[in-house]
Amino acid sequence: MTGEPVTQTATALLVLGCPQVPVQTSIALYLINRLKKAGIVPTVAGNKAANTLLVVADPDRHYLGEVMDLDRAVVMITEKKRDFDRCFVFIHNDAGVTYAGTMSAISKAKVYAVIYGEHYDELVKQIDFPCTTIAAKAVHNPLPLKKAIDEVAPWAA
Amino acid sequence: MGCVESMDYEIVLRDATFKESRDYIKKTYPEFRDVEPGFKVFDTHVIGLPPIAIGLDGDFVIFPFTKPCHGTFLLRVEDKGEAARLRALKK
C-alpha cells in the first residue's frame, strides 16, 4: 500500500449504425485515434458488417481495440456487468436515434449523438433525451463531420 | 437477440419509426404496459425510446424490435406465460 489514489482509465463506447453511409467507418477510426491519444480506451460495438469494415481496414489493430457485437453490448450494460464513461452513437436513420435513446437510459456514460447523412437535420429534431449532439451533413465526405467533432472535442470533456 | 429470429412471430408493422410503432401499439391494443429500455421481453433486452409500449392481446405479446440496418419492426408472438408476466406488471 503506497497510499496513492487509484486512477481508473477513462473508457468510451462507439455504437455503430448501419454502415450504408460511407463516412461512418472513416469517422469511427478518426474518433478512436483521438480518444486513444487522450488516454481514453475505446471499444466498438456494431453489427457484423459495421464491425468487419473496421477490422478489415485496420488488420494490425493500430487504431482498433476491443470490438464487440452490438446486442452483446446492450445486454452487458443493461445487466450492469459493464459500462463506459463516454458513449458515441452513430446516427443516420431512425434506428440510430432509437439506440441513442436506449444508451441514454441504460448507461451512466455521457452520451454523444453523432448525426450525419443526407437528412441529418430531421434526425437532430428527434433527439429529446439527454445527450450532446454533434451533427453535420456528411455522406461521402467525412470532413464536415470531422469539423463538428473537433469543435466539441469530446476527448477533452 | 438471436432468440427473436428463432421465434414463431408475425410482423405487425415494418418500415415505421420507433415513435410510430409506439403510437400504433397504444392505438391498436387497449391493453399495454410501458417499460424502460433494456427491459427483458422473452429473452430479449428491448431497444427503444422510453417509455416503450408493449401490447397485450389475449395470449399474444406485441413488442418493438429494432435493428441498425432495418429499423423497427413490431412483432406479435403468442406466449401465455409471457403475456401473464407482463400483465402482472403495474400499469
Image (spheres, helix red, strand yellow):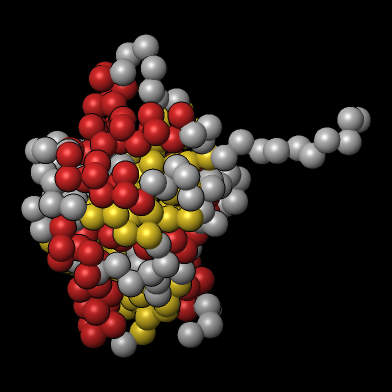
From the top left corner, tell me how far across and down residue A77 is, in percent: 52, 49
Depth check: give the residue in front, A36 or A84: A36
In this view of the protein, which residue sits in the foreground, A90 or B77? A90
Residue found at x 57% / y 40%: A10
Of all residues, the one furthest to the front in this rendering is A151
- What residue appears at the point 33 percent right and 72 percent down from the top-left corner? A128
Q: Residue furthest top?
A: A60
Residue A30, image x, y percentages: 31, 32
Is residue B20 shown above or below B91? above
Q: In the figure, is residue B70 to the left or right of A35?
A: left
Q: Is residue A39 above or below residue B74?
A: above
Asked if residue A145 can be seen in this view, the reply is yes
Q: In this view of the protein, can residue B41 be seen by the observer?
A: no
Residue B54 position, x and y percent, is 37, 72
Nearer to me, B2 or B9: B2
Image height check: is B67 above or below A21? below
Image quadrant assignment for residue A16: top left
Q: Residue furthest bottom?
A: B30
Q: How many marks?
A: 0
Give the residue drawn at x 24%, y 27%: A53
Q: Position of residue A107 (x, y in %)?
A: 51, 56
Quadrant position of the N terminus of chain A in the picture = top right
Identified at 14% across, 41% down, the residue is A21
